[in-house]
Structure formats: C-alpha cells, structure tokens
Image (cartoon, rainbow, N blue to C red):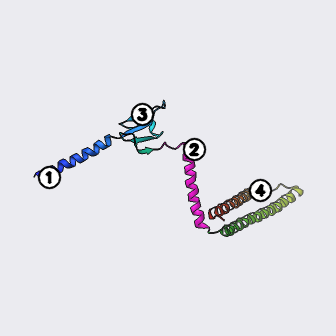
Amino acid sequence: MLKPVALSLSLAMGFGHASLAAADEYYRYRNDKGVTVLDRLGVPPEYIEKGYQVVDEQGRVIREVPPAPTMEERQRMIEEKARARSDVQLLRIYSEPADVDRARTRKLAELDGVIGVAHSNLSSLRTQQANLQSQAAEFERAGRDVPEHLLVQIDNIKAEQVGVEKDIQRYQKSRAEAEAAFAADRERLVELRGE
C-alpha cells in the first residue's frame, strides 16, 4: 500500500517540478513606447504581432516568435507559393522547350481554324444580306412596299453579323493571349532548366 502512495507522490512532485520550470519562463517584448518589458504572465494581444522572446531566469532566449509578416510580405509569400506550384506544373507538362513550341503550334492552329470558320460564316452572312437587299431593291424599283418578312430577315442577318464579328474579336484576343502564355511558359521553362 505504501508503494502506490510513494509513486503518486513522486509523480506529483515531478509534475510540480515541470510547473516550476514553466514558471521560470519570461516573455520579453517591446511596448508602444519602445521599452523592453519582461512579463511572467505572457504578451498582451496588441504586442503579439510585433514578435517576442521567451527567456529563462538568466535572460537566455529559449524561443523566439518572429513578428507577423506585413501585408506586402504576406502577398509576396502568396505569390511565391503560386509561382512554385506553377513551376511544378510547368515541369510536369513540358520536358523541354520544343514541347512548348509543339503545344503552341497545335493551339494556334486550332484557334486559327476557329477564326477561319467564323470569317467564312461572316462572308456567307454578308452574301445573304446582299441577296436580300437586292430583293428588297427590286420591290422598291417596282414601286411596291418591301414585305415585312424580308425586312425582318435583313435585320436578323445584320444582328448575326455583329455577333460573328464579336466572336472573331474574342477568338483573336484568345489567340494573342495564348501566344503570350506559351512564350512566358517557354521562357520560364528555359530558366528552370538552366538552358
């Protein structure tokens, strides 16, 4: 019966000693006036982001908590992480600059094909509009009113042409963006590969 009590006492004393060791820690920080403060209770919340040190009774640094990063530093870290992820992905996709060139050629050919089809559609719509306008002119030369359905068709074709022209502009913009993106990927790959 004495052995369990002795064990309990030694455990309690061990835990008590650990508590005393923690009590020997001090927190060192600077307040708003620039004065260095040593505090056994901790660092007030308003000073935590400025960083602080945990020191022992002799003033030796046990642990240092650096200041919180500024907004600019946080933004830079986010950008660096994004760049690192992008680099990993780039190296996974392409093994050499020639791979980037081949992918660029394929993508630009695809976009050129889409642009070509859109130009062809635009040309077809312009031909249809010219034919309908010619029919409308025949009615006017004959002194008759142009039928309403003919005027509606002409208006619809004009609206379609505007839509196709916008599509062409969008495709051309996508082509320019793709070209710039492939150029940037190639340049970065060469940089990463040290070529």
Q: Earlier in the sequence, mark 3 or mark 2?
A: 3
Location of mark 4 (residue): 158
**Contact (CB < 8 A) between labels 4 and 2?**
no
Q: Earlier in the sequence, mark 4 or mark 3?
A: 3
Location of mark 1 (residue): 4
**Contact (CB < 8 A) between labels 2 and 1?**
no
Amino acid tagged 1: Pro
Location of mark 3 (residue): 37
Amino acid tagged 4: Lys
CA gap between label 3 and label 2 equals 28 Å
Q: Residue furthest top?
A: 33
Q: Position of residue 78 (x, y in %)?
A: 55, 51
Q: Earlier in the sequence, mark 2 or mark 1?
A: 1
The magenta-colored residue range is 66-94
**For this view, does 115 lie left or right of residue 142?**
left
Residue name at image x 78 percent, y 55 percent: 151
Q: Position of residue 15 (x, y in %)?
A: 25, 46
Question: Within 10 angstroms of label 3, few (less than 14), some, or many (20 or more) residues?
Answer: some
Residue name at image x 39 percent, y 41 percent: 55
What element does badge 3 sit on? strand
Q: Earlier in the sequence, mark 4 or mark 1?
A: 1
Name the front one of labels 4 and 2. Answer: 2
Question: Within 10 angstroms of label 1, few (less than 14), some, or many (20 or more) residues?
Answer: few
Amino acid tagged 3: Val
Location of mark 2 (residue): 72
Q: Which mark is residue 143?
A: none
Amino acid tagged 2: Glu
What element does badge 1 sit on? helix
